[in-house]
Image: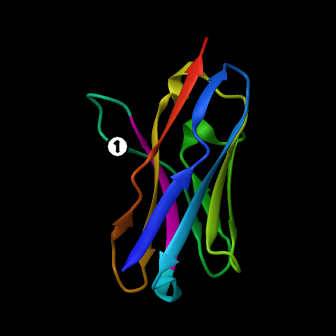
Amino acid sequence: QVQLVESGGGLVQAGGSLRLSCAASGRTGSTYRMGWFRQTPGKEREFVARIRWSDGITYYTDSVKGRFTVSRDYAKNMVYLQMNSLKPEDTAVYSCAAQITGTTKYDYWGQGTQVTVSS
């Protein structure tokens, strides 16, 4: 089991920045990669970014490229999402997720943190 807890959400004006954190605990030794997702009411959950745990290789959805940066602290079992130049359309509940080695999906999810961007 892996437990994930997000923090860092809040209210920010358009153009501002926030940094989300995701603390992983439990059996993190088998983590393959970590992802960030977001969801707004009435919409499907959307992939935002991911990072491979072993080497830090990252991938982003097009709408956040150049504005968001995902990183990890291997020693602290932390994953971060630095969000710059925020837009009102970035408003959502952001969740982190962990994919375990040998699986093809994200196996564990955090509870999410609300990000609200005002215009």
Question: Above or below — where is 5 with respect to 27?
Answer: above
What residue is shown with label 1? 45
Question: Above or below — where is 33 with respect to 88?
Answer: below
Callout 1: helix, strand or loop?
Answer: loop
The mark total stands at: 1
The magenta segment: 32-39
- Counting from the top left corner in percent of width and height, residue 94 is at 48, 44
Residue 106 appearing in the image? no
- Counting from the top left corner in percent of width and height, residue 86 is at 66, 28
Q: Hey, what amino acid is under mark 1? A: Arg
Residue 23 appearing in the image? yes
Closer to the camera in the image, 7 or 62: 7
Picture quadrant of residue 92: top left
Question: Above or below — where is 91 with respect to 36?
Answer: above
- Counting from the top left corner in percent of width and height, residue 111 is at 39, 52
Q: Quadrant of the N terminus?
A: bottom left
Q: Is 73 within the magenta?
A: no
The residue at the point 31 percent across, 29 percent down is 41
